[in-house]
């Protein structure tokens, strides 16, 4: 075997091992790298390892990670996926909500209205489930941080309020100064606001999740939060499916004279974000629910 | 032929059978299983099986300075292998008996 091929196999082996969950890699990663160095990395091996990694994510082994730690990590990933889909839905709502009120989507007009309503209802229910299910855990974490007088943890835990609030303030200020009545803001401002919104969303998730990973939260509130995150994610998927159906309907039925269109690139980007977030969030939710089930 | 048997050549049993002959690391297990049982275990399958067997307490990892960590079958693993072998033997005996009966009926 040439040196070039050895280097290529080593890189490929490292990439394959990275597909496994962190706890799995800590325990078996070095051994698997040694085995792949001995056997080489063929297409068959690659497919086999990819399948093995998927199995390791879906069926975590009990001896590799303490159950509460797995639930905490899975809640973090599920919530991250939830925020990604929510961000995609907010951009969709901002860009396409008006379309449902325009007569030029006919004959798809009633359909787009129905899908828009379904999206709104499912989105609202999803937020409610997440807030109600996560509230006991949030209270537990805040009490714990206050008890320890950890200003850093308190700041991280309140990030969903402060980061979202700051974003809304910026949004309001830009709408007041750069907005045009009836036409919103210029495309450049819109993209800047989207980027800011994504950053605020990332901060919303990253703050509490960082505390959650470090603090050994456990008990009923943790399990309830895991169930709520899974349920909220599933309901949000209904909202995303309705939005996707709406985008496709607008693409198919809108007349050339319409003021709003749904190009294929927009549909593909929206679909890709939802698909990726569903894969990550769905896997994490299954892991969390399995861990919760073994508790009870 | 072994490849065609699929379900009968369950990777966990093959790994347990291999370790019943002595402690081995991952690569040695794949070599032994391929040479003695005719089944090639890829890395993903092998470490999925090792994780499952270790979780159930059927095998244990031995200390090693090398990253190739050897594994050893435990008493619970040996008991499980014995039980599975017994079941497979009874199925094999039944199958052999019925094949003989079928062959006699065909020649009669």
Image (cartoon, rainbow, N blue to C red):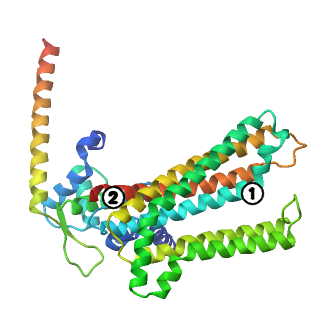
The residue drawn where x is 57% and y is 46% is A238
Whichever of callouts 2 and 1 sits on the residue coming sooner in the sequence is 1
Mark number, residue A94: 1
For this rendering, which residue is in front, A222 or A275? A222
Which numbered circle lies on residue B107? Answer: none
Residue under the point 27% across and 41% down: B7
- Judge from the rendering whether residue B38 lies leftward or rightward of residue B91; answer left or right: right
Residue B37 is at least partly visible in this image: yes
Residue B78 vs residue A242, the one in the foreground: A242
Question: Residue A16's image quarter?
Answer: bottom left
Q: Which mark is residue A292?
A: 2
Where residue B62 appears, as percent x and y from the top left, is 19, 73
In this view, the residue in front, A257 or B71, is A257
Q: Residue at x 44, y 87 (%)?
A: A150
Residue at mark 2 to residue at mark 1: CA–CA distance: 37 Å
Is residue A231 depicted above or below A5 in this figure?
above
* x and y percentages locating residue A258 in the rendered image: 87, 44
**Secondary element at tag 1:** helix
Can residue A32 be seen here? The reply is: no
Regarding mark 2 in the picture, which secondary structure is present there? helix
The image position of residue A222, as x and y in percent, is 37, 65
Q: Chain of mark 1?
A: A
Residue A57 x/y as whole percent: 40, 59
Q: Compared to A14, does B52 lie above or below?
A: above
């Amino acid at each position: 075997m040439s040196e070039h091929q050895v280097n290529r196999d080593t890189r490929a082996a490292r990439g394959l091992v990275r597909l496994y969950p962190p706890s799995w890699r800590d325990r078996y990663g070095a051994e698997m790298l040694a085995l792949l160095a001995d056997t080489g990395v063929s297409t068959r091996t690659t497919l086999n390892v990819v399948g093995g990694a998927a199995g390791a994510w879906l069926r975590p082994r009990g001896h590799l990670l303490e159950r509460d730690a797995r639930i905490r990590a899975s809640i973090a990933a599920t919530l991250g996926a939830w925020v990604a889909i929510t961000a995609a839905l907010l951009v969709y709502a901002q860009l396409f909500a008006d379309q449902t009120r325009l007569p030029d989507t006919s004959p798809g007009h009633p359909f787009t209205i129905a899908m828009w309503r379904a999206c709104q209802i499912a989105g609202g229910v999803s937020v409610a489930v997440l807030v109600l299910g996560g509230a006991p855990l949030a209270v537990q974490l805040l009490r714990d941080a206050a008890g320890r007088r950890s200003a850093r943890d308190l700041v991280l835990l309140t990030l969903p309020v402060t980061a979202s609030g700051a974003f809304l303030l910026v949004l309001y200020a830009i709408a007041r100064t750069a907005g045009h009545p009836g036409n919103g803001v210029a495309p450049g401002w819109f993209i800047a606001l989207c980027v800011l919104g994504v950053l605020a969303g990332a901060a919303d998730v990253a703050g509490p999740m960082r505390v959650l990973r470090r603090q050994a939260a456990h008990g009923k509130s943790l399990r309830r939060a895991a169930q709520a995150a899974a349920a909220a994610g599933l309901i949000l998927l209904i909202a995303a499916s309705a939005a996707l159906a709406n985008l496709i309907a607008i693409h198919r039925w809108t007349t050339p004279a319409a003021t709003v269109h749904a190009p294929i690139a927009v549909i593909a980007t929206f679909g890709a974000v939802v698909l990726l977030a569903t894969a990550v969030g769905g896997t994490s939710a299954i892991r969390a629910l399995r861990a919760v089930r073994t508790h009870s | 032929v072994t490849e065609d048997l699929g379900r009968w050549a369950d990777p966990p049993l093959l790994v347990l059978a291999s370790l019943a002959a002595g402690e081995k690391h991952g690569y040695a297990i794949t070599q032994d299983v391929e040479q003695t049982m005719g089944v090639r275990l890829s890395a993903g399958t092998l470490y999925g099986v090792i994780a499952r067997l270790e979780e159930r307490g059927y095998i244990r990892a031995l200390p090693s300075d090398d990253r190739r960590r050897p594994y050893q079958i435990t008493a619970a693993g040996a008991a499980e292998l014995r039980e599975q072998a017994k079941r497979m033997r009874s199925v094999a005996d039944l199958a052999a008996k019925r094949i003989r009966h079928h062959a006699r009926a065909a020649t009669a």
